[in-house]
Amino acid sequence: MSLNFSSPFFLFGLFGVSVPILIHLLTRRQQKHVRFSAVYLLFQSQKRSVKTSSPNRLLLLFLRCLGIALFSLALANPFLSLGNSEVLRNNSPTSYVFIVDNSFSMRTQVKEKTLFDLATQFLSKLLTQIPDGSEFSLVLASQPAHISQGWIKQKDSFDKFVKNLKPSYQTTDMGHTLVKAANLLKNANNKEKKLIILTDLDKNGWDEEVFSEIGTLPNTPLQIYNFSSLSFKRNEIAVESVQTHQEFLARSPILKIRSTIKNYSNENQRLPVSLLVDKELEKEILLDISAGQTISEEFSIPLRKGDPIQGQIKVGDDVLPTDSRRYFSHHPNQNIKVLVVDGDPGTVSHQSESFYLERALNPFSVSASHIDPTISTLAELPLRKLSDFAVVILANVRELPIGYELELESYVLRGGALIFGMGNQIDAKYYNEKLGNLLPITLKAIQNIEKTHLLFRSTEHPVMRAFSAQAIEEMKEISFHSIYTIQARDGKNFKVANWFTNQNPAVIETDSGKGKIILFLSSLDREWNDFPIQPTFLPWIQRWTQYAARGLENIVHQNLLVGEPYHQNKDQDQWVVETPKGNLHLITTADGQATFKKTQTPGIYRVFELPEKHTQKTISKLPLGSQPIGTFTINVDTKESSPQKISEENIKTFLPNLKVTIKSPELNGSNLPSAGGMLLTTPLFLLVVAILLLESWMIRRE
Amino acid sequence: MDEVSQNYDPQVLTRISSLKITAMNLVDGILTGQHRSRHKGSSVEFAEYKDYSPGDEIRHIDWKVAGKTDKYHVKQFEQSTNLKCTILLDASGSMAYQSPTNQGESKLDYACNLVAGLSYLFLKQFDAVGLTSFNDQVVQHIPPRSKPSHLQHILHGLSTLSAEGVTQIEDVLARLTERLQGRGMLILISDFLTRDQDIQKSLKLLRSRGLEVILFHVLHPDELNLPFEGDTVFESLEDDPTVGLNPIDVRERYQKAIQEQIDTLKNISNGLGVDYALMDTSIPLQQSLSYYLIKRKSLIKI
């Protein structure tokens, strides 16, 4: 048990005790002594007086001194540690590594403060108990784990540094944080070493695999302060995702905003879900979510001409508001730019592989179909910028330029759509060897058959849903005489969208990253079938293109998580990104790619094109003529939202070499955490008040 | 003689020598003086005749009247007797009070002058005067004598007096009452600053024995007004506990208390036919005594 002071400066106030003593001595010197005859009459008069008590000046002096002393002590914020901070009770200089969990779950609110505020205040208090000569370092535990402050001996500077810390919007990465801490302890100057973690013990971030790397710190005491114990409520609700979807297939002028909301609590919840568009409340509904369930809710709003739409979905209020809202942005009425790579161009146009495709995709003009095809030969392909296109159709392409398959992989992972059409030119061996990462199947061989037809086992596929029964019947009549047979690759998932009547797949689709890959196992010209000349070919190929282009938003409006960099692939040299707080950042293109990395704050970021080259390194105001060219949203990763906590047993299993103890800091009256000790400020102030009352009562009695 | 002169102010004695005190009642005395006696006896001044009765002195028979009337008449004379006065002087500690500011004479000094003046006056009138000083007991006793040289004894007694001890008037008076012979005069000079004393009972006893009693209540103006200021520690001149206070807080109540005491004494005195005179030491003794004697003379029955 020890008495500590968080503001020891106020202890100088104890010198104030001398003031009443001096006053007492000075007034005592002024007291006269008179030898008098009628003293008994004076005594009687005094007794009859209202002030009947004789002033016990010494008692008053004592009370006044005590009052001043207690007042000074109260201002110094004393707290009685009841043995909770054994880790700090050490008189020899020690090397302390503090790990502060600054992930967004530490933004959980406790009254008017966040757990992170309480953690930093707590750390400041801990510092007051640490013996002089010790050294400190600080590692922040959110992704990416990094050493925020290396070894430092100046307690004041370290305290100042701690007080200026802010929580991030990242997830926890306790494993790598401990690796960093272990490295720090290796370079510690003192023999005594201690590790202190201030965290909410969210299970997310305690990655067992990473902990195996920490085995070099035998017998180092690890004190974990669990701040989640300070919060009476847990995180209950999180908006896990928001997707905007303009119904291209139906040519609807309606934008659909679909959000998935998870109820982490053990109780059914009825919560208001709000749709805010351009910071104004557009719609609000009450949503019932069962305990532990995730539900989707779709809002529909009319599209307003060609204006981009930015907004957020907000759900109720819980102790962690950070994940109760999610941002989205949408650019309506965009043409789907399609790159058709013709693998078998002919000298006569209608003999080209892309002849029917081009006409089917854009029979009259762009405005009619909202599909803007660009025909390219293989030779031209390296000159094309894939990111300009939402969909790339490889029609009967024998093989790609050297190394181009990697570019395609990257394109798909970022949200691009890839449609393969078969034909005689296809080199199955090349496809199977080089495009293994893209294709979920291997091509076996061309199967020439007398006649086969499309088989529609179900019309549930979104592409087929718009077709009438008559159209389906017509499509069933189409004859196919050559198809490619395939074989599934191990560990790859894909769906068969259509079958041929000979039990071979006709169309298969698979997701890769944020993109989509579709294989049509016959030709897209008349070489292997007569589908291109059928009336149903046009809507069929258009709907597949539109369907595949669902990842379009991921290219034009990138939906990123906090900390993920934003890539811009346009030709211009300079871009300006405006953050949600209104700060401007100038991005300069390097190697054909501009990257913006300061995406630590959730919100909607806007990208502008400058009218002329900006010569300075920074930009404070958008110049006149700057054009908005896009937006991207940054949202938190809801992995951190789960209120599930890691148990002490698990931690001890992960860290077998460390002496782990987990404590709960306590909240005192002023909402400041103390290390399990008792804050004496309030009792002392009450004592001072009691002394003042007693003193005034005694003076009144005189 | 030097010691005597310290307590004997010739100027005072000279001034008051012209004043004569006349006792209100006739007292028995041995010496003939100017005090009229209600007792008839042989003296120079004829009073009346009375029929002879056996036992009357034969030498008082008026033979001329017997020759004319053939009856025996005895001559009676109005006899002048001298006064036997005992002065009781309080010599307790409280009488030593003197102002802490101007350090003038103490109450005891004032009282000694008063005693000296009165003694001179009595002796000049051929009255017998004695002095008894006391605190809680009799300190000094000089029996009454009418010889002029007796003044020296009294003055000597005064010069050796010092103020000390606790006042116990009641006990002292009780003891003295036994000692005082016959009718006479008792002058009690004191500040009467004593607690829990029933002086009324003692005075009643004295009066019942035919003694004429005069009370001289000697008080210092500080004792009347409590003029002190600021935090003061009052230490008693007797055995009271020390009191620390600010006089301003209690001044009003103190003045009321001392006035109550004076009034009580006055009332007791009036009720018992005792003369009472308040002697403020700030007023010159001559003035106070003259005032008292004039007042007393005006009340005398001739």
Image: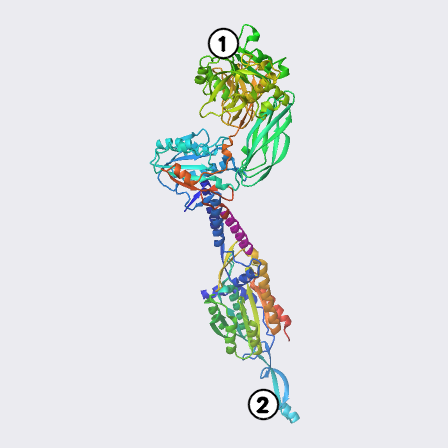
Disc 2 and disc 1: Cα gap in Å?
A: 188 Å
Q: Residue furthest left?
A: A191
Q: Say above or below: B54 vs B250.
A: below
Where residue B84 appears, x then y in whole percent? Answer: 54, 76
Q: Which residue lies furthest to the right in this view?
A: B69
What residue is shown with label 1?
Answer: A379
Q: How many marks?
A: 2
Q: Is the magenta stretch mostly helix, strand or loop?
A: helix
Q: Which residue is drawn at 58% across and 84% down?
A: B42
Instruction: Specify whether residue B257 is in view.
Output: yes
From which residue to which does the magenta span run? A684-702
Where residue A286 appears, x then y in whole percent? Answer: 62, 36
The secondary structure type at the circle numbered 1 is loop
Where residue B137 appears, x then y in whole percent? Answer: 47, 71
Q: Which residue is drawn at 56% across and 74% down?
A: B201
What residue is shown with label 2?
Answer: B56
Q: Which residue is drawn at 64% across and 16% down?
A: A368
What amino acid is at disc 2? Asp
